[in-house]
Amino acid sequence: MASEHFEYNLTAKEILEKEFKTGLRGYNPEDVDEFLDMVIKDYGTFTQEVEALRAENIRLVQELEGSPVKRDAAASFQSQPPVQPAGTTNFDILKRLSNLEKHVFGNKLDDGE
């Protein structure tokens, strides 16, 4: 199974070290720094979480590939009954079953009388 790798435009360090030019009517540097500090913290957290999830994914794939459960799961999936069509409710199924029982058992009762 191929692992997707996403490319990032920036690292947390690049965000931290970014310098903005100031102009006559530029943004307040303290506000920009405060906001970027939050972005850096979140970016670092997301990066750590992505790496942890990648490692867990790799571990689970390897565990599954080395386990007989993979073969059993595939066989079980193939032997499962079909999913009921959309829009069919349990009531509809019970109604159809009741009609079938009446048809089958009703004829047998009539034959025995």
Image (cartoon, rainbow, N blue to C red):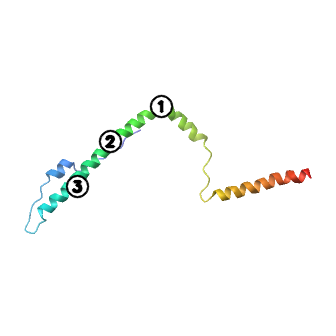
Marks 2 and 1, how far apart at CA = 22 Å
Instruction: Name the side, left or right, on which 17 lies relative to 75.
Output: left
Q: Looking at the rendering, which quadrant does residue 33 occupy?
A: bottom left
Q: Looking at the rendering, which quadrant does residue 89 occupy?
A: bottom right
Mark 1 Cα within 10 Å, few/some/many (few <14, many 20+)? few
Give the residue displayed 12% in from the left and 64% down from the top. 28
Residue holding disc 2: 52
Q: Amino acid at mark 2?
A: Ala
Q: Split into 4 quadrants, where in the image is the N terminus?
A: top left
Marks 2 and 3, how far apart at CA = 20 Å
Q: Earlier in the sequence, mark 2 or mark 1?
A: 2
Residue 55 lies, in percent from the top left, at 34, 38
Give the residue displayed 61% in from the left and 55% down from the top. 85
Above or below, comparing residue 79 to residue 85 in the picture: above
Residue 101 lies, in percent from the top left, at 77, 53
Residue 30 lies, in percent from the top left, at 12, 61
The residue nearer to you, when weighing 90 against 27, is 90
Residue holding disc 3: 39
Secondary structure state at the residue bearing disc 3: helix
Give the residue displayed 28% in from the left and 44% down from the top. 48
Marks 1 and 3, how far apart at CA = 42 Å
Q: Amino acid at mark 1?
A: Ser
